[in-house]
Amino acid sequence: MRYLPLPCRHISSILIGKDLATTSLKEVRSELEQRLNLSPGSLDGEKEKLKHMVAAQIQKIQETAPSRRSKGRRKEAQEAQEAQVQEAEPGKASGKGAKGAKGPSTKERQRTSMTRKEFMKKAKAITVQIGDKKLKATPKQFSTGSSGFMASTKVVIEVDGVPLTLQCGLNLPVIGSKEWRD
C-alpha cells in the first residue's frame, strides 16, 4: 500500500477496545485516514487490501485475548469455591447478597419457589418477538436439569436489501430452577 506506513500497527490500535462484531471496515478505513492525515475517501481504492489486513489484526487480537468462555469457567469455579468455604463456616452470610445490603441473589430466592412438576403443569407459553417475527416459547425441562421456555424457528431479516434466513433457537432457563425438586 503506497499510503500506509506501518498500517498494521495503526489498524491494531484502532481495533483495540472496539466491539469487533459491530465495527465496520468503513469505520476503520475512515479512522485510518484521519490518523494518517489523508483526506476522506483516500483509501477507498485500497478496500480489498485493508479488508485482509483488518481481518488479520482481528484474528491476532482474538488469539491473544483470553476467551469469554474460559473467563466464565474461572468465575464459576471461583464462585463454587466461595460457596464451599461459606458452607464450611456456619453463621456466615452467603451468596452475592452477603457483600452488601442487597439481600439474597435471584438464584437463592427462586431455587425453592416451586417444583419442576409444578412449573411444567402451570407455566403457559410466552411470546417473544425477534424483528417482525413473534415466537411462541413453550415450557420445557432442559437436559441440564433447569426448567424454562424454549422456541426454535427460522427468521428472515434483510441486510442491505438482501433477505437472509436465520436459524433462531431461544432457551430461557429460569434462574435457580436447576435446584428445584422433581
Image: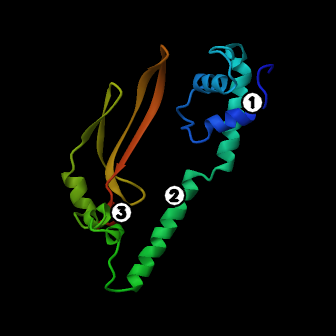
Instruction: Mark 1 or mark 3: name the one nearer the start of the chain.
Output: 1
Determine if residue 182 is in view: no
Q: Give 34 or 128, whichever is nearer the viewer.
A: 34
**Which quadrant of the figure has residue 39?**
top right
**Residue bearing the label numbered 1:** 7
Amino acid on which disc 2 is placed: Gly
| Mark 1 and mark 3: Cα distance apart in space | 51 Å
Q: Quadrant of the C terminus?
A: bottom left
Going by the picture, which residue comes out furthest to the front?
37
Image point (32%, 78%), residue name: 93
Amino acid on which disc 1 is placed: Pro
Q: Give 23 or 117, whichever is nearer the viewer.
A: 23
Check whether the beta carbons of the residues at disc 2 and disc 3 lie within 8 A of each other: no
Question: Quick one: SS at disc 3?
Answer: helix
Q: Is 146 on the left or on the right of 21, as rendered?
A: left
Instruction: Mark 2 or mark 3: name the one nearer the start of the chain.
Output: 2
Amino acid on which disc 3 is placed: Lys
Image point (70%, 37%), residue name: 57
Q: Is 103 on the left or on the right of 83, as rendered?
A: left
| Mark 2 and mark 3: Cα distance apart in space | 18 Å
Q: Quadrant of the N terminus?
A: top right
**Residue bearing the label numbered 3:** 178
Give the vertical position of 19 relative to 49 (above or below): below
Q: Give 154 or 161, whichever is nearer the viewer.
A: 161
Give the vertical position of 39 relative to 98 (above or below): above
Going by the picture, which residue comes out furthest to the left?
122
Coordinates of residue 22 in the picture (x, y in percent): 52, 32
Give the vertical position of 126 relative to 141 (above or below): above
Nearer to us of marks 2 and 3 is 2
Question: Quick one: SS at disc 2?
Answer: helix
**Residue bearing the label numbered 2:** 72
